[in-house]
Amino acid sequence: MRMRDESKELAIREKAIKMIVEKGFDGLSMQKLARAAKVSPATIYIYFKDRDDLIIQLWIGEMQKMAKATLEDFDPNVSFEEGLRKQWMNRARFCMENQQSIHFMEQIRHSPYDLVCQKKMDKTFLTAMGTFVHNAIKRKELVPLPLEVYWSIAYSPLYQLVKLHTMGRGMMGGAEKFVLDEKIMNQTLQLVVKALKP
Amino acid sequence: MNVDNAIDILIFKTNIDTEQDLNKVASLLNRENHIRKWNVDLQDIDRVLRIESEGADQMEIKKKIEYAGFLCEDLID
């Protein structure tokens, strides 16, 4: 009888993500993964059905971490500006503290796994985001827009700034350092809120 | 994925490779009452055959797969 061992599963997950981030999906083999996680290849198959199942379960795990961090202390019933500020703070913090996780999810996005994964998106997260947006529209704090347009205006600026922060250099030839601090974040947020006001 | 305590997971290294091979294996395993689910990881070099069973005999299964003409051995560390 093989029993589940949380620490083994955790080691497998951590090493698998590291492998995919460093070497791409092709760089992930069960043998190499077993060696890296210091378990036997058979152990991996106790937790995961096959390679595809492993990759999808990895995404679900990282997505849930992200959803949890994004929803921390977030109330979907507060004003649009206050809620969006909280979202920006939570998302920026998660991205900066979990760069490997972000990189991995980005790889999934550009892979055939994306279609399967998106269907498994955390429902609590989707509901909270939906409630937040619909409340804001009802209160006339937010102009009704197609979801894609709303998302592009509300969040893309933040993710772009986070990317520049992570790279650590600005756009003026890249010689000067760019740091995304609270002042810059608030300055950008003000413009975004202004753009989304009815 | 949830693994029930009553469920045994058997793992073998095989050379099951094609759709045809899978059909052959299916005709063997699908009629085993002790086997709840099975799959072969065709993307892995060891073509791992994974079986979720309730009390199936590891040696029996191994013999059956080998008798059908496939390699079937324990996956060693």
Image (tube, coloured by chain):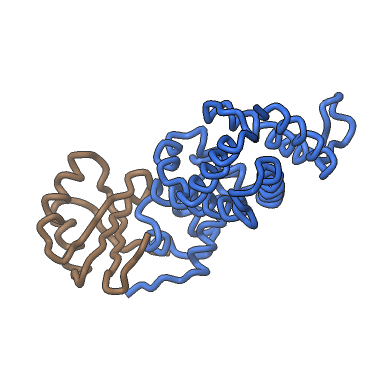
Q: Residue furthest right?
A: A176
The percent position of residue A48, horizontal first and vertical second, equals: 39, 57
Q: Residue furthest front?
A: A139
- Number of labels in the image equals 0
Q: Residue at x 17, y 50 (%)?
A: B25
State the blue chain: A
Q: Is residue A140 positioned above or below A7 on the image? A: above
Q: Looking at the figure, which quarter contains the C terminus of chain A?
A: top right
Along the line of sight, the residue nearer the viewer: A76 or A13: A76
Q: Is residue A14 positioned above or below A155 on the image? A: below
Q: Residue at x 53, y 30 (%)?
A: A147
Along the line of sight, the residue nearer the viewer: B25 or A189: A189
Q: Is residue B63 visible?
A: yes
The percent position of residue B47, horizontal first and vertical second, equals: 32, 49
Q: Is residue A22 visible?
A: no
Q: Looking at the figure, which quarter contains the N terminus of chain A?
A: bottom left
Q: Quadrant of residue A112?
A: top left
Q: Residue at x 42, y 60 (%)?
A: A44
From the viewer's perspective, tell me whether residue A40 is left or right of residue A75: left
Along the line of sight, the residue nearer the viewer: A177 or A4: A177
In the rendered picture, chain B carries what hue? brown
From the viewer's perspective, tell me whether residue B39 is left or right of residue A161: left
Q: Is residue A165 positioned above or below A125 on the image? A: above
The percent position of residue A123, horizontal first and vertical second, equals: 45, 49
Q: Residue at x 78, y 39 (%)?
A: A165
From the viewer's perspective, tell me whether residue B13 is left or right of residue A40: left
